[in-house]
């Protein structure tokens, strides 16, 4: 089990630009603000969405695309480092006009209509980082299990 104490840093709130890519915008924001560890939440709406589902047996993602407006019911995720750069890992729940819910792993290709976000920066103690590494057991890039 990985357990490292962290403390709360800055809380960054704002709005993302209409027409921009949601995942790319959140990632760029983290780069601009030098957020290397944190929690991200957002609400709003998208004009189209692209979400992923991880097939555990095949160790591959498949993606679904939803054209047309959807409300962002919830976007929840974390921020850590992957290959030394901020990496946003988020899941999103969306609702269509008819009330149908869809969601999954947020992927590039999700276009913002309106989006308000809150990022809570976290600061690890003793300058330790949360860096993602390839995990053989799952086929995913995850935080390591052992303390360094």
Image (cartoon, rainbow, N blue to C red):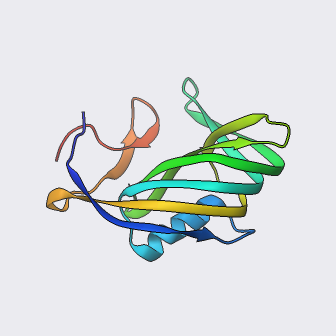
The picture places residue 64, in percent across and down from the top left corner, at 74, 40
Screen quadrant of the N terminus: top left
Looking at this view, name the residue that lies furthest to the top.
57
Query: Which of the pair 52/6 is nearer the observer?
Result: 6
Q: Residue at x 23, y 53 (%)?
A: 6
Q: Is residue 77 visible?
A: yes
52 in relation to 22, above or below: above
Q: Is residue 109 visible?
A: no
Q: Residue at x 22, y 40 (%)?
A: 3
The picture places residue 135, in percent across and down from the top left corner, at 38, 37
Instruction: Using residue 83 as the reference point, say whether residue 146 is left or right of it.
Output: left
The picture places residue 10, in percent across and down from the top left corner, at 35, 68
Q: Residue at x 35, y 58 (%)?
A: 37
Query: Which of the pair 21/9 is nearer the observer?
Result: 9
Instruction: Using residue 49 as the reference point, say whether residue 123 is left or right of it.
Output: left
34 in relation to 37, above or below: below
Instruction: Using residue 140 as the reference point, say whether residue 51 is left or right of it.
Output: right
């Amino acid at each position: 089990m990985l357990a490292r104490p962290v403390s709360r840093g800055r809380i960054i709130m704002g709005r993302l630009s209409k027409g921009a890519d949601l995942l790319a915008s959140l990632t760029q924001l983290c780069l601009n603000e030098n957020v290397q560890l944190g929690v991200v939440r957002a609400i709003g709406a998208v004009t189209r969405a692209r979400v992923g589902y991880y097939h555990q047996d095949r160790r591959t993602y498949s993606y679904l695309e939803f054209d047309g407006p959807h409300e962002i019911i919830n976007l929840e995720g974390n921020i850590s480092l992957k290959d030394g750069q901020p990496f946003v890992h988020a899941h999103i729940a969306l609702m269509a006009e008819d009330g149908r819910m869809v969601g999954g792993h947020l992927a590039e290709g999700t276009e913002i209509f309106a989006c308000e976000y809150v990022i809570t920066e976290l600061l690890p103690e003793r300058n330790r980082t949360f860096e993602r590494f390839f995990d053989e057991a799952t086929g995913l890039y995850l935080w390591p299990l052992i303390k360094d």
